Image (tube, helix red, strand yellow):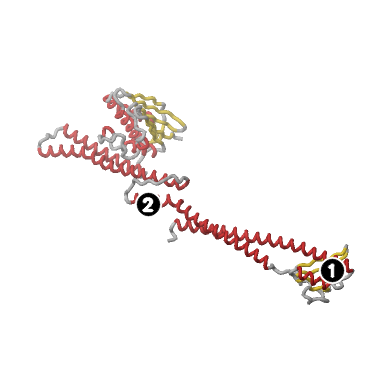
Amino acid sequence: MFSSLRLKLLASFFLVIVIGVGTIAYISSNSAINQFDRYVSRDQAERYQRLALTFSNYYRYMGSWDEVSNLTAKVSEMYNERIVLTDPSGVVIGDTAEKLIGEEIVSDWSNKSVTINLGDFSIGKIYIRTQQRSPLQKTFINSVNKSVLTGGIIAGIVGIVLALLFSRNILKPIRELTEATKKMQQGELDQRVDTSAGGEIGKLGESFNELARRLKEQKTLREEMVSDVAHELRNPLSNIQGYLEGLREGMIDPTKKVFETLHQQSLVLNRLVNDLRDVNRAKAGKLNLDKKLLVLEDIISREIKALKAKAEENGVEISKNLNGPNLIEADPERISQVVRNLIDNAITHTPEEGEIKIETRTSSGEVRTTVTDDGAGIPEKDLPYIFDRFYRVDKSRSRGTGGTGLGLTIAKEIIESHGGKITAKSREGEGSTFEFALPLPE
């Protein structure tokens, strides 16, 4: 029960409200009472000074304290305290309770005393034993405490109601996120949550939506991959099976051309299997690299020469501007694989009489290689995903116009395993530029 986030949040709000309201009520009540007591004390001090002046005038008029008991009796009717009057020697000469007359006053008898002066001479003292609070004062204090308590209760109730509302609004996106996550767990990947809340909750919602979108894309890619791989395997396997059945039945003569065809079909299968293996190894960080010091421009020139025949067959011209030589530490076979893949893709997607430009240049401790074509380009919606596994801009299943979409994925993993980076820029109808950067040895 108490594992609920809402209960924990409400408990936190309730604790803060109780502590806050209680503290404020306590401080307010004490402050009001202290101010009232100070006011009462000032008022009493003034009254006692007036009382001392009354006795002083009496002494001036009478010349002595004779018959002062009459004045003391009148004072007793006016004041609600017990008042004791002493002469300068400390002997009691007047007591509103008529108990201490003729005795010496005890020093701790009263908590209030006022000296009676006549000119520069002391003629006596007044001792007052005050009550803690009068009934009227107690009524006022109780009224203050009651008002503070009522205000605290009302503030607490309002705070709890607001806490309920706020916790509901705060946790609403989280509840939606939880429900969406449960549905995603059941395979419903079309879930999206509202991100209008902003702040950390909004960012969490945006991250969830992006995750859901990517998961759906990956699911779609996996489904397409299964279909693509099945199609890629079906064609060579069907051809091999057809030739073998023909050879077995004697319908096809075992000529060199037949065996060459079978060999080519097996190479297609082998290339597909190798591509899948390389991708899995690269994703697992187990891609074997045999790094050596080599000249990048030599590898590029060799691959251009190897693909020159295909380019001429397609009516495509290849030009190069190699700013080198640039010595790098890399696996020559893997770098050749990357260069070959990029040039081969450019030839495939460049129309007849088109041109492919290959350039190298150094910048900030790295060598950059660009392969630019003037082909059909890549749609903007596809550009962020072209390095994803099995993603093909051309959705046809012909290996000649897109393959299974493993080449660029492998190229990306190879370059990144060398500490480099590969990027793509394109505008539909204006061609594409692929660039990879490799670090230069220190």
Furthest-top residue in view? Answer: 353
Q: Which residue has dot 1 on it? A: 124
Q: Residue at x 24, y 41 (%)?
A: 230
User: Looking at numbered disc 2 in the image, what kind of residue is underneath it?
Assistant: Glu
Q: Is residue 114 visible?
A: yes
Mark seen at residue 179: 2
As drawn, 112 above or below 371:
below
Residue 365 falls left or right of residue 76:
left
Instruction: Tell me the kind of residue under disc 1.
Output: Gly
- Counting from the top left corner in percent of width and height, residue 437 is at 41, 33
Q: Is 439 drawn above or below residue 141 in the view shown?
A: above
Q: Position of residue 163 (x, y in %)?
A: 49, 55
Query: How far apart are the alpha carbons under marks 1 and 2?
Result: 88 Å
Residue nearest the viewer, comparing 406 with 246: 406
In this rendered view, identify the residue nearer to me: 417 or 233.
233
Expressed as whole percent of the image width and height from the top left, the position of residue 1 reads 42, 61
Considering the numbered disc 2 on the image, is that residue within a helix, a strand or a loop? helix
Q: Quadrant of residue 289?
A: top left
Tell me, yes or no, if residue 298 can be seen here. Answer: no
Q: Earlier in the sequence, mark 1 or mark 2?
A: 1
Residue 343, percent from left and from top: 33, 30
